[in-house]
Image: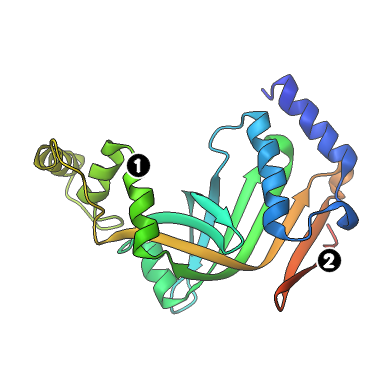
Amino acid sequence: MIDDQVAQLRREYEALGLSERDMAADPVSQFRIWFDGVLEAGLEEPNAFILATADARAVPSARAVLMKGIDEAGLVFYTNLASRKSEELRANPTAAATFVWIPLHRQVRFEGVVAMVDGEEADRYFEARPRGAQIAAHASNQSQVVGSREELDEAFRELDAKFTGVRVPRPRAWGGWRLQPHQVEFWQGQPNRFHDRVRYVKDGTAWRTERLAP
């Protein structure tokens, strides 16, 4: 059940709709406004999004990941650099990211190019992770076939013992990616499925907005 606070926010957002003249000058600023609303609503995993990639043959794949930062340079997430998603991003350095906040009837879609986060930035984020998550990053060769869950658990226990009492370093095969958007679409649900859609498109160093049919 959607609680009263979330339901009220959804009704307010639908009543306001989306007007190009009332939106921020750039998509990151507008995203932050919407994200504040998601936090206010108390939705679970508000920073979760679907990341879509494609390999060198243009075969697509998608999965849920967590946003760990966003600024004018782009949207940041972290992963194993030997994972399927990382291999595809190296082979075809473009991606799409979709945030869906169903209780609020809102969606944001990013499309753009990707670049790896530099080592210093990745180190800072890794040091801020819980110790268990740091150990897990060492123990898992993400996306690779393993014999059993027990095999994974044993690798975790061995590494937990190895790093007892010492700082856990960032694995060489673990880092971040930054999605640098060239277009961002904001979608607001409306009655009769006659939804509001406003897209930001990069035009040189500036952004322009355009309305899309629902």
Which residue has dot 2 on it? 210
Mark 1 or 2: in front is 1
Residue nearest the observer in this picture, 208 or 145? 208
Which residue has dot 1 on it? 129
Kind of residue at disc 2: Glu
Give neighbour class at mark 1: few <14, some 14-19, many 20+ (Cα, 10 Å). Answer: few
Q: Where is residue 142 in the image (x, y as percent from the top left)?
A: 29, 55
Look at the numbered disc 2 and give the secondary structure of its residue. Answer: strand
Q: Where is residue 93 in the image (x, y as percent from the top left)?
A: 48, 74
- Do the residues bearing badges 1 and 2 touch, measured as CB atoms within 8 Å? no
Q: Position of residue 206 (x, y in %)?
A: 74, 72
Residue nearest the observer in this picture, 140 or 1? 140
Q: Position of residue 123 (x, y in %)?
A: 33, 54
Q: In this view, does 137 lie above or below 97?
A: above
Kind of residue at disc 1: Arg
Q: In this view, does 146 lie above or below 162?
A: below
In the rendered structure, the answer to whether residue 184 lies left or right of residue 54 reads: right
Residue at position x 43%, y 79% from top?
A: 56
Residue 26's label in the rendered image is none
Residue at position x 83%, y 57% from top?
A: 214
Residue at position x 79%, y 47% from top?
A: 188
> Does residue 199 show up?
yes
Give neighbour class at mark 2: few <14, some 14-19, many 20+ (Cα, 10 Å). Answer: few
Distance between the alpha carbons at the discs numbered 1 and 2: 39 Å
Q: In this view, does 199 lie above or below 40?
A: below
- On the image, which quarter does residue 34 sit in? top right
Q: Is residue 189 above or below residue 121?
A: above
Q: Earlier in the sequence, mark 1 or mark 2?
A: 1
